[in-house]
Image: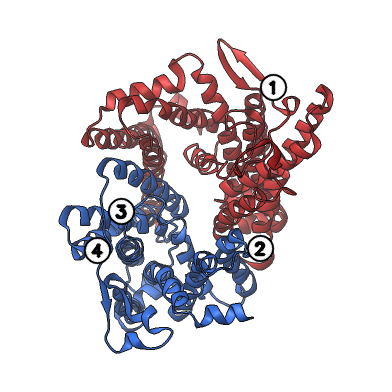
Chain colours: A red, B blue
Amino acid sequence: MTDVVASDPIDALPKEVSAAARGRHLVFGEIVSLYALSIAGALLLSGLLVYLTGGSARAVLGALLDGSILRPGRWGLTLGSAAPMLLVALGTIINSRAGLVNIGQEGQLLLGAAFATYVGVRLGGENIGQVAGFGVLVALLLAGGAGGAMWAAVAGALRFKRGVPEVLSTLLMVTIASNAVGYGLKKDWLLLAPAGDRSNRNQVSEQLAETVRVKRVTVFGNEFPITVFLAIGLAVVVAFALARTVPGFRLRMLGQNAKTAQRAGVDSARYGMAAMLLSGGFAGLAGAVMLAGGDFGNYQLVPGFSVSIGWTGLLVALVAREKASAAILVSFLFAGLRTGSGFLAATGVERKITGVVQALLVLALLIPPAFLYIRERRRALNASKERI
Amino acid sequence: MGALLDIIGNEVTYSSAMRFAVLLLFAASGEWVAERAGTLNISVEGMVLAGAFGSAVGYDLTGSTVAAVFVGSVAGFLVSTIQANLSHRLPADQFVVGLTINILVLGLVGFLDNVLEPTVVRASQLTIPVLASFPVIGPALFDQPWPLFLVYPLVPAMWWLVYRTRWGLEVRASGEDPNSADVSGIHVNKRRRQTIYVAGITSGLGGAYLVLGAVGSFADSIVGGRGFIAIAAVIFGGWTLRGSVAGCLLFGAVVSFRLSLPDQGYDGINTEFLSALPYIVTIVGMALFAHRIRPPAALAKPFLRGLN
């Protein structure tokens, strides 16, 4: 078939084939222009909003660029914020490829951070050595993953044992997680730091010891934690595992057609549960990375520690359309909006505008594929009618 | 035990429980209609918040609480049009759309709140003469800010709409068996969009009630996840209206305990546990009854003609 297309002009082909080939050319142009149009629409709307409220869209863009990459040291900060977003997105990609909807990453991340804090503070004392400190750091990261995985496992078990929709259970468990962590931060046998070294009774945990923290490297005056490399490495691993391994293939089969997967011998409960565990585990790991990385707070757990990174990571996965490689770029973009918003105060525009920009971008990127899908189906239906 | 009797006998308990339950009732009654059509709208949270902010701005502009309530319901409706048209005209995933809408509305409201800084007042109190003097529950039900009284006709109206009109029959058919509904000439996705508009309007009213009736001021954290509790109440109620109402009252009471118990001198109660309780109750309820209660058969399944 490809040979025919390559050697002959499209018109020489049989009627149906040529229509399909023409369609393909048309579709590519359509796709590009549709995406361009929707993204432009989203940015235009955001700009209009800034303009109508008396701000200057150009100043906002300049401030965002300055704050995220241009000013010295800023792209390091952006990388540091992007790492946990990317980790959350990777987990989300795994569960959505398996056809499951996990939207509770915010809670899984927070619980992971809490587990990591507990392990990091209990195992790593003040005077812990270099080697032991590294051991504790690894344990802390694993504990974070375990905490997130445990939280997602509850939703997974409810889904596969009791038929409770995982969309709702994961969402509802976000609030439960934040209350549980809030409770832990009030009890000194759990997370609360001993009252001795503080005058006020703030709900904060102890700080991680120096040697238990993630090492930070400096490149061209930009400092960032080395967990950035861990996140990118894991993105490559996830992309490879989903595309090229048998379990990855089975997960995708489960997501695309559960019936076919079952006939081919894929245990939907087992693989679904594994997907949920991995998804929660990645979110929990992101929480641990935030805690030990140093870009979020002062190496200690506070109420509201997750600062919407879980939600943003979920959006990253949606925008990246379930592709791990694309998630790397998108997480950097969204992290840039986050770090760049720190510079918005100078322009007099409220920094919450970045939340609007993010959400509008996501909505805009939902439209073209949906639109194309309908077009494609209409064509297929018409074609099947003609055949009859 | 004495403490429990104290709480049960206290009029304040019922007033504050009612205050929380009514917001849920507004949002849940519309979301119930939408779920009977086979849609599940996480964006209820955003619709309530938009309604709350809309009514605050509406009051700031007009100085009339009636106009403010109207503007609130319009704001809720506008948000619902995004959800309805992206996920039931175009086939975008309804959870993705709903979640994004919540983030969009939260950002937009936070942004605009700082620009416009609307000032609001509490709506005037309405007292039904004889009924309000009924012991224990009288004041809770009949001596309240006037927007609360909208909920009394609203809930039966929703029941009538779904069970006693042709439109309601078509809505239920769309939620149970969209393919059969489609071949019998019902425009499934149109009905679904319309039910989401209904949910948007009632959620907007809920937001207006929250600002004008319950709180009397606006902050962008005012809804704080209670839209999700409204969805939970519909599920908890097994997709029946009376069950949803019971769920709203129960969750409203639980949410209000968090504030009313410490007020009445019971300090030993764990506030985090009380905040999480509605969510825990919902999840446990779903786990226990998910087999016995039957959701609309096509709940949260998108409908595309000729696909199935």
In the image, A242: left or right of B229?
right
Q: Residue furthest top?
A: A220
Residue contact between numbered discs 2 and 1, judged by CB atoms under 8 Å: no
For the point 50% across and 40% down, which residue is it? A312
What is the three-letter code of the residue carrying label 1?
Lys
Q: Nearer the viewer, residue A286 or B210?
A: B210
Asked where in the image residue A110 lies, by quadrant, the reply is top right
Q: CA distance from mark 3 to mark 2?
A: 36 Å
Q: CA distance from mark 4 to mark 1?
A: 55 Å
The chain ID associated with circle 2 is: A
Q: Which quadrant is home to the N terminus of chain B?
A: bottom right
What is the three-letter code of the residue carrying label 3?
Phe
Asked where in the image residue B39 lies, by quadrant, the reply is bottom left
Q: Which residue is mark 2?
A: A158
Q: Which residue is mark 3?
A: B53
Judging from the image, what secondary structure is the residue with disc 1 in? loop
Q: CA distance from mark 3 to mark 4?
A: 11 Å
Q: Nearer the viewer, residue A386 or B84?
A: B84
Q: Which residue is mark 1?
A: A215
Residue contact between numbered discs 2 and 4, judged by CB atoms under 8 Å: no
Q: Which residue is mark 4?
A: B69
What is the three-letter code of the residue carrying label 4?
Val
Residue A252 image point, x, y percent: 62, 46
Other-residue count near label 3 (Cα within 10 Å), few / some / many at <14 / 14–19 / ≥20? many
In the image, A194: left or right of A228?
right
The chain ID associated with circle 3 is: B
